[in-house]
């Protein structure tokens, strides 16, 4: 998989999976041991993507849950953290298309202060709302309200 030498997004025609594959290939060592050593050397790095800290926190929560849920591992987060994450996603299409996904819906958390939008009601735990806002359709099973099926249809098959 080869992309031309320009910015990573442009050279891969904005194909996220291709970008990840190329970056992974750049970091792989000749052996698994060498790859692990390269990883260990980068752990203390303070380099970060050009995203707001809250976006990176959201990515950590969402992808952590992507791993935990299939394994049956539950993680409780401080309500302030998931509320702030939900507030970020409700107004952003920067990393994920959350803002567009929840248009015309009223989301209301039943475990904290988060609420947003107007329209058909979708309610549930703040973390579950975050996961549904980021396109995880399976989390819609844990939500209630007249807007759940519309939200699920906007999530796709994730």
Image (cartoon, rainbow, N blue to C red):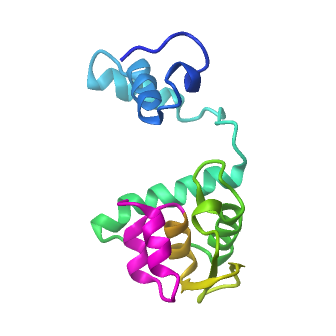
Residue 48, located in which quarter of the rendered image? top right
- Tell which of 93 and 29 is nearer to you: 93
Is 2 left, or right, of 106 in this rendering? Answer: left
Residue 138 on the magenta segment: yes
Compared with 5, 116 (above or below) is: below
- Tell which of 155 and 142 is nearer to you: 155
Is residue 36 at all visible to an observer of this figure? Answer: yes
Q: Where's residue 90, x and y in %?
A: 67, 66
Magenta stretch: give its range: 134-158
* Quadrant placement of the C terminus: bottom left
Residue at 53% over, 31% down: 14
Is 156 left, or right, of 49 in this rendering? Answer: left
* Quadrant placement of the N terminus: top left
- Tell which of 117 and 30 is nearer to you: 117
Compared with 108, 17 (above or below) is: above
Residue 46, located in which quarter of the rendered image? top right
Residue at 72% over, 47% down: 52
Is residue 75 at all visible to an observer of this figure? Answer: no
Q: Where's residue 30, x and y in %?
A: 29, 15
Q: Where's residue 71, x and y in %?
A: 28, 65
Q: Where's residue 153, x and y in %?
A: 43, 68
């Amino acid at each position: 998989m080869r992309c031309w030498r320009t910015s990573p997004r442009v050279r891969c025609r904005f194909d996220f999976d291709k970008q990840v594959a190329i970056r992974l290939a750049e970091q792989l060592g000749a052996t698994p041991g060498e790859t692990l050593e390269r990883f260990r050397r980068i752990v203390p790095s303070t380099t970060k993507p050009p995203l707001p800290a809250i976006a990176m926190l959201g990515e950590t929560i969402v992808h952590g849950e992507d791993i935990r849920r299939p394994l049956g591992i539950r993680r409780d987060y401080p309500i302030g953290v998931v509320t702030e994450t939900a507030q970020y996603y409700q107004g952003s299409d920067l990393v994920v298309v959350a803002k567009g996904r929840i248009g015309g819906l009223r989301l209301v958390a039943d475990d904290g202060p988060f609420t947003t939008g107007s329209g058909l009601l979708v309610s549930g735990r703040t973390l579950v709302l975050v996961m549904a806002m980021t396109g995880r359709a399976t989390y819609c099973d844990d939500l209630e309200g007249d807007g759940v099926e519309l939200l699920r249809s906007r999530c796709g098959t994730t």
